[in-house]
Image (cartoon, grey):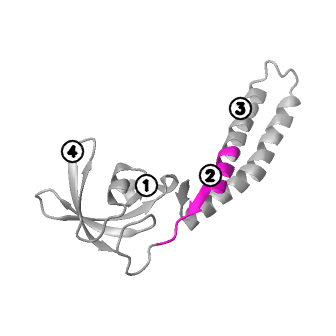
Amino acid sequence: MKYISLEGLKKLKEELEECKTIKRQEIANRLEEAKSLGDLSENAEYSSAKEAQSFNEGRIFELEKIVKESIVIKPGRKGQKKISIGTVFEVKLIDGSPSKKQIFTIVGFQEADPSNGKISNESPLGMAFLGNQIGDIIEVETPKKKNKYKIVGIK
């Protein structure tokens, strides 16, 4: 099962449509042009177009599978007590220095963007927060060290 937001699903469907229509047509045009050049056995343009075709068809297959198997994340509800997929929440990093607050959103791995606070439900950090509530202190092992976070709000 893959979790995805409604926005993320829309983007994937748009990419899928582009791959099926625009990119397929562009590649077909490249192949026709390359065929017109003659001998295909030593035709670099033909080989390049065939490779692009193969990549595009693979991407179409991948996108169709993701769209079919994805579960749309419902946004967090007001008054929600526990962190779940789709929840936006605020934490305070507990490390002895002045408190550092961060806002995170739990998303599916397709949409993860840690630098913008979107963490995957499958990541160690995401898994550590799931099911917890305001006031809980979570300890997460990172490649550099262990971090402790206190959940201070759920939005």
CA distance for labels 2 and 1: 16 Å
Task: Out of 152 and 81, give the one closest to the viewer.
Answer: 81
Which residue in the structure is indicated by mark 1?
120
First in residue order: circle 1 vs circle 4: 1
First in residue order: circle 1 vs circle 3: 3
Which residue in the structure is indicated by mark 3?
51
Looking at the rendering, the stretch of residues picked out in magenta corresponds to 61-75
Amino acid type, residue under disc 1 in the picture: Ser
Amino acid type, residue under disc 2 in the picture: Ile
Specify whether 84 is left or right of 69: left
x, y percent for residue 43: 79, 23
CA distance for labels 3 and 4: 43 Å
Q: Is residue 72 magenta?
A: yes
x, y percent for residue 90: 30, 69
Q: Residue 145 carries which label?
A: 4
Q: Nearer the viewer, mark 3 or mark 4?
A: 4
First in residue order: circle 2 vs circle 1: 2
CA distance for labels 3 and 2: 23 Å
Q: Say which quadrant the C terminus sits in.
A: bottom left
Q: Does the magenta stretch include residue 96?
A: no
Amino acid type, residue under disc 4 in the picture: Lys
Residue under the image location 45 percent in, 54 percent down:
112
Label 1: how many residues lie within 10 Å, few (<14), some (14-19) or many (20+)?
many
Rendering quarter of residue 114: bottom left
Q: Is the magenta stretch mostly helix, strand or loop?
A: helix
Label 2: how many residues lie within 10 Å, few (<14), some (14-19) or many (20+)?
some
| Residue 26 versus residue 137 in the image, above or below | above
First in residue order: circle 3 vs circle 2: 3
